[in-house]
Image (tube, rainbow, N blue to C red):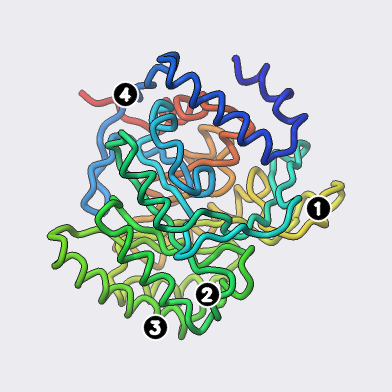
Amino acid sequence: MFYSFLRPLLFKLDPEVAHCVTFGAIEKALKLGLLKHQIIPCQQRQVMGITFPNPIGLAAGLDKNGEHLDALATLGFGFIEVGTVTPRPQPGNPAPRIFRVPKAHAIINRMGFNNHGVDRLIENIKTSSYQGILGINIGKNFDTPIENAVEDYRICLHKVYRYASYITINISSPNTQNLRQLQSATALNEMLSELKSEQHNLSQKHGKYTPLVVKIAPDLDTSQVETIAKLLIKHQVDGVIATNTTLSRNGIEHLAVSHETGGMSGAPLTQAATEIIKQLHHFLQDSIPIIGVGGIMSAKDAKDKIDAGACLIQIYTGLVYQGPGLVSDIAKEVCETAV
């Protein structure tokens, strides 16, 4: 109710300014003790060897540097994913780089993995009080040649391993040049082979098994999805996130900002992301869990993704348009109340 009043005011601001203003207000409220932790009554779910208190997560991108974990924890999420983080700090693409499409309940962004680097992320996590399930999303620096990309992922994997509940390998952002080439059969096979080997070594070193998850694009045809599924099974990857943002502009071609480059999220992505989940579920045959994300703007959208084969779901753009109440709305639709 309160957010429906606040949103028009926030939407008068530049999206990045609104982001900073919102988190500034939330952090101040947290320090003053004004934020109450939202409790989501839900039966726990075992996925990837992890006990999730509820299946509703925050997707990567909202808190790239892990600076707001304590505040986000009050919203009732079953898990939070931070990042994408890269080995070295980088500013991302020039502004303006994020555009709202209110008539379509969508956002176009070309942020470009702007972040303070993996070392700063770790420091933020260490100073946080957050004790919940934490996913850390890793990527490559923009100036690392694509043929050397695996080294950037390896660096991040080593550094975040002990702090993460699971680690997401982001090879599907459309905003880093050539990144999606890593979804090709040859590149993905090589990357998964090397990173799974590193995962084994790190699990021995730390006495802790941290699952590896791959995040894929919605702009894939059926044969590409099948190829990726076979490689995920071959390398015993622990999970897959479907999907990232889309390059498609279907349904918003007539709107003013549709020409802006970048990945689109929100309502126009809903069906495409759900279709990828259905295809993955068909090819994986429950051998690998799917985390569904992309265009979840309502409780029904979340239920559709679970019905399509997702074990867990994540939201981001829906939170921007619907507010934090979306978490409890989804819970009423998809959660079995714990006895």
Q: Position of residue 193 (x, y in %)?
A: 32, 80
Task: Return the residue at label 1.
Answer: 258
Report how far apart the C-alphas of labels 2 and 1 lie in the structure: 26 Å
Amino acid type at image mark 1: Ser
The residue at the point 73 percent across, 41 percent down is: 100
4 left or right, relative to 250: left
- In the figure, residue 143 lies in which quadrant? bottom right
Q: Are marks 4 and 1 in contact (CB under 8 Å)?
A: no
313 left or right, relative to 181: left
Seen from the viewer's position, the closer of residues 256 and 269 is 256
Q: Are marks 2 and 1 in contact (CB under 8 Å)?
A: no
- In the figure, residue 73 lies in which quadrant? top left
Q: Are marks 4 and 3 in contact (CB under 8 Å)?
A: no
| Label 4 CA crowd tier, 10 Å (few <14, some 14–19, many 20+) | some
Seen from the viewer's position, the closer of residues 240 and 140 is 140
Task: Return the residue at label 3.
Answer: 190
Report how far apart the C-alphas of labels 3 and 2 lie in the structure: 16 Å
Disc 2 or disc 1, which is closer to the eye?
Answer: 1
Split into 4 quadrants, where in the image is the C terminus?
A: top left
- 261 relative to 326, above or below: below
Looking at marks 1 and 3 on the same chain, the residue that comes earlier in the sequence is marked by 3
Amino acid type at image mark 3: Glu
